[in-house]
Image (tube, rainbow, N blue to C red):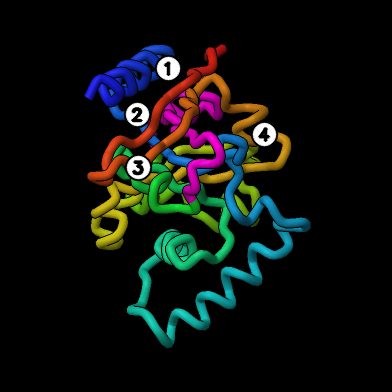
Amino acid sequence: MSTWNDFLTEVRKAEKELGSPAEPWYRGHTNKDWELIPSLPRQTSWEEKEKSLFFEFTRTASRLFEKRTNDWETLFDMQHHWIPTRLLDWSTVMGVAIAFILHGDYTDTEDSALFILNPLSLNRLSGRTDVINIPEDKTFDYKTIYWEKRPVQIEKPLAIKPSQQISDRIRAQQGVFTIFGTEDASFETAGLCCTNQLEGKSPLTPDGFIPLLPSLAYPVA
C-alpha cells in the first residue's frame, strides 16, 4: 500500500506545481516517449485530409448511427471510432487515465507516463478565461474556427469540455478533450507550463491492482 500512497503523493505534488487546479485533467500513455500529439496531426498533409475524413465519416455514419445535431458530436464519434482527428482524450478521473495505461499495449518493458493538465492555464495561453463547453458555447464552431480560421487562426491547443449527455462513453469515462491548433504550437512547444508528467513502471500485481510507480515529475516553467 505504501507504493500507492507514494504515487498519490507524487500526483498531488505535480498538481500543486500546476497551481492546484480545481479540476485537473489526466491522460495515460503506456510509453513515456509518446508525445501529446493527436492522431491526425501525426500524418503528413494532415490539414488537407481533415475535411475528407470528416465528410466521409459523416456519409457513413448517417447510415449507421442516430443523427447528430452538430459537428462537434460527429467529431467526438470519429475520435471514438479511431478515425484520425485533432482531438486528444483526457479524463477528469485519474483512475480512467491509469486504466488506459494498463489496458493499452502495456508490456512492462517501457516506462509509462501519466500526464496531468491544468486546463484553465492552457486556455489562458490563447486569451481564454474558461474551459470551452461544447456544444453550449455557440461561438466556438468547429468548421468556422478550424477550417475557415475565423475570426483568427487558433495556434495553441485548447481545452474543451463536451456535454456529458453527448454519449454514454463520454459520461462513463468523464471524458474531456484538448483540440490541436497548429504544428508550431503543440504541447511540446507551447503547453509545458500547463502539464506535468509522472513516469515509471506500471506492474500488475497478482490481484490486478497497483498502477503506476512514478519516478519523475519534471519541473514546470
Indicate the amino acid at tag 4: Ala
Pick whichever, 205 or 180, lies toward us: 205
Pick whichever, 126 or 41, lies toward us: 41
Marks 1 and 3 sit apart, C-alpha to C-alpha, by: 29 Å
**Residue at 42% in and 29% down:** 116
- The answer to whether residue 74 shows anywhere in this view is yes
Please give the residue where the numbered disc 1 appears in the rendered image: 18
> In the visual, does 150 lie left or right of 160?
right
Quadrant position of the N terminus in the picture: top left
Marks 4 and 3 sit apart, C-alpha to C-alpha, by: 36 Å
For marks 2 and 1, the one nearer the N-term is 1
Please give the residue where the numbered disc 2 appears in the rendered image: 24
Q: Where in the figure is residue 203, as x and y percent of width and height?
A: 39, 38
Cβ atoms under marks 3 and 2 closer than 8 Å: no
Marks 2 and 4 sit apart, C-alpha to C-alpha, by: 21 Å
For marks 3 and 2, the one nearer the N-term is 2
Cβ atoms under marks 2 and 1 closer than 8 Å: yes
Indicate the amino acid at tag 2: Pro
Marks 3 and 2 sit apart, C-alpha to C-alpha, by: 25 Å
Marks 1 and 4 sit apart, C-alpha to C-alpha, by: 20 Å
**Residue at 63% in and 56% down:** 40
In this picture, is 150 found above or below 10? Answer: below
Indicate the amino acid at tag 1: Leu
Cβ atoms under marks 1 and 4 closer than 8 Å: no
